[in-house]
Amino acid sequence: MTGIDDYLAPLPEDQRKALQRLREIIRNGVPGVEEDIAWQMPAFKYRGSSLVGFAAFKGHLSFFPMSAVVIEAHRDDLKGFQTTKGTVHFTRRSRYRQLWSGNW
């Protein structure tokens, strides 16, 4: 895999659009962020440290803030999303369309 474009290319359209939008949000929100592939998924580094990543799975998309502290600090903002200690999940029914349309 040579980059995020290669990761996104074979995905179903709804997943690709949602993750492309997330990619844009990250790139626009963090000047100087660097794209990478880490742990076989798109990842972003800032000043040499892992910042966030995302991945597509059969039934959902995942956003990895690379810190459980971030998820806990934003617990109220994440109501309605399925979360784990280190991941936010987006399912087709709940959030794909909201993510790529910017209405979330």
Image (cartoon, rainbow, N blue to C red):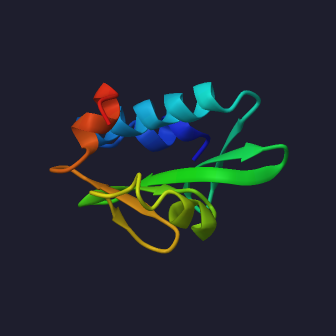
Q: Position of residue 87 (x, y in %)?
A: 47, 64
Q: Is residue 96 above or below residue 28?
A: below
Q: Is residue 12 above or below residue 86?
A: above
Q: Residue at x 26, y 36 (%)?
A: 98
Q: Residue at x 33, y 59 (%)?
A: 57
Q: Is residue 44 left or right of residue 41?
A: right
Pick the residue in front: 61 or 28.
Answer: 28
Q: Is residue 28 left or right of residue 31?
A: left
The quarter of the image holding the C terminus is top left
Q: Is residue 18 above or below residue 81?
A: above
Q: Position of residue 66 (x, y in %)?
A: 62, 61
Would residue 77 be visible to someone looking at this image? yes
Would residue 12 be visible to someone looking at this image? no
Q: Position of residue 53 (x, y in %)?
A: 56, 52
Q: Position of residue 62 (x, y in %)?
A: 41, 57
Q: Residue at x 58, y 69 (%)?
A: 68
Q: How many marks?
A: 0
- For this orientation, the residue located farthest to the right is 47
